[in-house]
Image (cartoon, rainbow, N blue to C red):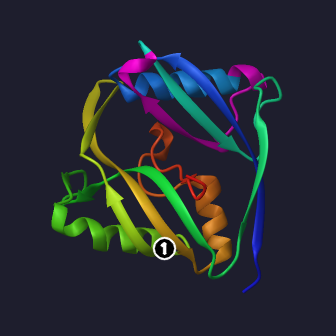
Amino acid sequence: MNPMTVSYQEAGLMLPDSANRQDIHAQVYSAVSQLRGSKLERDYIYSVLQHPGLKGQVMVTLRGQSLPKDIPAQKHSQTFEPGRILRSRAEIVTMAQIPGERYRYRDRRPDELHQWLTDLVGRHGFALKDAVWGNPKRSRIKRAGTQFSVPSLSFTMTLEVVNPVDAASAWLNGIGRKKGYGFGMMEDISDE
């Protein structure tokens, strides 16, 4: 299988913090739409860093192949080739659908996490070599008369590229559920 190189841009934004991920989602979408001058399809992903040291703000990292020109962005590229080892970090939603229940979910049990993560990254062109994760978090999402919370974990993973096309797609589009709320964006931490 041939290597796959993707070019993309990344930019950082500081936005007001909120306990509601819907508010952060709306701020990111509004900022990007306003700078583009239109409400296009979401063709970017983003991650959210919430930390007490940011004093009421969150740091948002945007990634897309074409971010609005008014956002100061850095150009990057990644090459995915079979056998490449990549160290990555991502905050991933860990909810599991309850069998037979259309809109009911549960948190994944600790004993399920390793196999679930192996399967998830496997569907996205990677083999999981190693993983550690932090303490579980819950994020509240309140919108249009409905409110729910989603469980997530920050995973630090050692991955091997198996399918370069799928791996490149995961890099640009994220992995897992609720990517529109800032989950699932993979970071390259190979140099750390």
Indicate the position of residue 62 as horizontal and vertical percent values.
Answer: 63, 37
Q: Residue at x 45, y 18 (%)?
A: 54
Q: Which element type, helix, strand or loop, lies under badge 1?
A: loop
Using the image, determine if residue 175 lies above or below residue 53. Answer: below
As drawn, is 70 to the left or to the right of 47?
A: right
Q: Is any part of residue 100 visible from this angle?
A: no
- Compared to residue 167, the image places residue 188 above or below, namely above
List the residue tagged with mark 1.
Answer: 123
* Magenta highlight on residue 48: yes
Q: Amino acid at mark 1?
A: Arg
Residue 182, how many percent across, how many down?
Answer: 48, 39
Q: Is residue 133 left or right of residue 32?
A: left
Query: Relative to 94, does residue 46 appear above or below in the rendering?
Result: above
Whether 90 is drawn above or below 148: the answer is: below
- Which stretch is magenta? 34-54
Which quadrant of the figure contains the N terminus?
Answer: bottom right
Q: What residue do we see at 47% from left, 50% from top? A: 184
| Quadrant in the picture for residue 11 | top right
In the foreground, 134 or 99: 134
